[in-house]
Amino acid sequence: MLITKDIKLADVILQNYHLIPIISRFGIKFGFGDKSVGQICTQYHIKTNFFLEIVNAFNDKDYKPYEKLKNMSLSLTVSYLLKSHYYYNKVKLPFIENLIDSLEWEGEDNLKNKNVLKKFFRQYRKEVNEHTANEETEIYPYVLELEQNYNNTGKVSVSFLEKLKTKSIKDYADTHDELNSSLLDLKNIIIKYLYPAENKDITVQILIEIFKLEKDMTDHTELEEKVVIPVAEKIETELKKRY
Ligand SMILES: [Fe+2]
Ligand SMILES: [Fe+2]
């Protein structure tokens, strides 16, 4: 189903509950009655076209939002990506870690198995943390600065010109593969190797949460690789020619 501005937001959620974290990332709260997507976006001062591209991309794996997003301000995509980082680091990863903590095995295996799982999970969490922190302090600010200077016809600062000489957005391009391989290790440990815990419902919940997180992060990475990096690269090339 293609989500349009005239569809009721409640119906969007009812047909795909996976969109719940996405709309919450935009700051939208429940209790929206029969309001349409367009009305909600106006109420929350969200750019409707941008919102539609993000929810449609998440709703339908064949929907490719990249061309349209490339024509919108990068600041919109970056602000959405920042909210996703917060969700991964402050909400989802601690939640999964708590679930792992509540797993139980009989006897001495309890501590041993829990520690194995926790070790892998902590490693993964640390990698996500470092990856997102690097984007937040290095990549996103540079990308935003590129866009600002591109749109600005006035004088550019000396510090920006210096950055333009020394930096290249290409250096940031492929840092995502490692994250995926750590997640695969974690899934394999639970699915294939670890002796099953007593509370199997929690094991199932952990796996489902990991798969959901993975899907969310895949979409996130696609936005970075197919929108942010190429658009920033184009702007960077233009600016390097200009100055
Ligand atoms: Fe990111
Ligand atoms: Fe990333």
Image: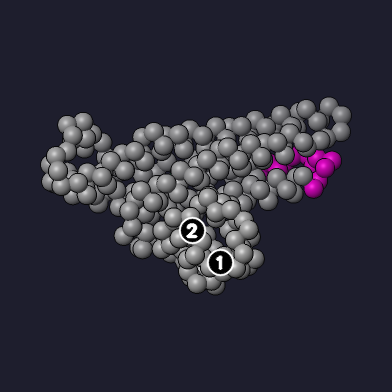
Q: Mark 2 points at which residue?
A: 43
200 within the magenta span = yes
Q: Is residue 124 visible in this depiction of the protein?
A: no
Q: Which of 175 and 102 is in front in this view?
A: 102
Q: At x 35% / y 63%, what residue is drawn?
A: 67
Image quarter in which the N terminus is found: bottom right
Q: Name the residue under label 1.
A: 35
Q: Residues within 10 Å of mark 1 (few under 14, many from 20)?
A: some
Q: Name the residue at 79% across, 42% down.
A: 196
Question: What amino acid is found at the position of numbered circle 2 in the picture?
Answer: Gln
Residue 202: % across, % down: 77, 44
In the rendered structure, which segment of residues is drawn in magenta? 188-201
- Rounded to the nearest whole Å, what is the CA distance between mark 1 and mark 2? 10 Å
Mark 1 or mark 2: which comes first in sequence? 1
Q: In this view, does 35 lie above or below 224?
A: below
Q: Do the residues labelled 1 and 2 touch (CB within 8 Å)?
A: yes
Mark 2 CB lies closer than 8 A to ligand 1? no
Q: What residue type is labelled 1?
A: Lys
Q: In which quarter of the image is residue 155?
A: top left
Q: Is residue 196 visible?
A: yes
